[in-house]
Amino acid sequence: MADGSISSEKVTIKRGAGGVRGWYDRVHRRWWFRILAWLALLSGLFWFLIWALIARNLPSVDSLRAYEPPLPTNVRSVDGVPIHSYARERRVQLSYAEYPKQLVEAFISAEDKTFFSHHGVDFPGLARAAFQGIVSGETPRGTSTITQQVAKNLLIGNEVSYLRKGKEAILAWKIENALPKEQILELYLNSIELGRNAGGVEAASQAYFGKALSELSLPQMTYLAILPKGPANYAPERYEARALERRNWVLGQMLANGFITEAQHAEAVAAPLGTIPRQTPDMSASAAISSKRFAAS
């Protein structure tokens, strides 16, 4: 090349892409990004399976807003007085305000002590039950909240499986969004099966003690609260000692929860069950009570 000539050198500058595309180009091959991507994919797949297997065909909770339990078919005289009634079970429907405060506290202590604070599902209790079920190899029982029991009793049935537990949990969440706590408890107390052909707590009061719920003592109300775990397990004519032990345990829970005093607890645990022998249901009495309820409503 001749002296004094000007030589030039071509320099190529390669710019990286900007924005989201540029960020993706920089990080998509890094290990932490791949882990996050897999976790997102697995999470999406998990929730899709939950929807497909459990949530897609669940019944609507709207029917619970106007739910009425099956009541007796009444035969009346010409002047309208009930003279006979046909039904598979005793059943009397009460409003939440008609249930004694101590009875509500007894059922909460026995079945779901965090009822007024959770939103349908007791997640810590559910995790403990699932762990115990995995360790024992058995499907956990007795782990449902009161709201989950309403979902089971009124909407999905009694199948024992993890799938039903999943349905219960989703429906319980929806029920809590749709209904106030008091109405959920009212549904529960009116629908729970308590043995002796008694559907609901008022009917059970008549079946086990021969008197109205408002007339029961604290230990008698507490006995009714142990029956959802299995009425046959605490039948007074066969398992009185077992029933007393369970009743007194619930009384201890009521004391621990601040619902009763030491004196009330001591007096209640010393009381006998006080149940009456099993009798043929007096459905005409139940019919009269039911008629009064509906006449007042």
Image (tube, grey):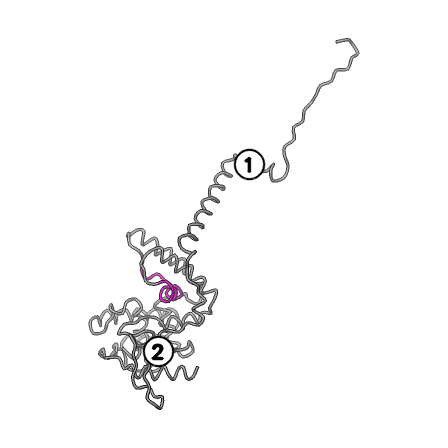
Vertical placement of 130 versus 221: above or below? above
Q: Position of residue 47 (x, y in %)?
A: 45, 50
Residue 263 appearing in the image: no
- Crowd band around label 2 with a 10 angstrom C-alpha radius: few (<14), some (14–19), many (20+): many
* Magenta part, dominant SS: helix
Q: Secondary structure at mark 1?
A: helix
Residue under numbered circle 2: 92
Identify the amino acid type marked 1.
Val
- Picture quarter with the N terminus: top right
Residue farthest bottom in this picture: 79
Q: Earlier in the sequence, mark 2 or mark 1?
A: 1
- Front residue of 163 and 26: 163
Residue farthest right in this picture: 4
Give the number of callouts. Answer: 2
> Is 162 on the left or on the right of 242, as rendered?
right
- Crowd band around label 1 with a 10 angstrom C-alpha radius: few (<14), some (14–19), many (20+): few
Q: Position of residue 128 (x, y in %)?
A: 36, 56
Vertical placement of 86 versus 176: above or below? below
Residue 151 appearing in the image: yes
Q: Which numbered marker is on residue 27? A: 1
Which residue is pictured at 71% across the width and 19% down the height? 9
Identify the amino acid type marked 2.
Val
Q: Secondary structure at mark 2?
A: loop
Q: Position of residue 96 (x, y in %)?
A: 42, 76
- Front residue of 269 and 22: 22
User: In this picture, which residue range is highlighted in magenta?
Assistant: 140-156
Q: Nearer the viewer, mark 2 or mark 1?
A: 2
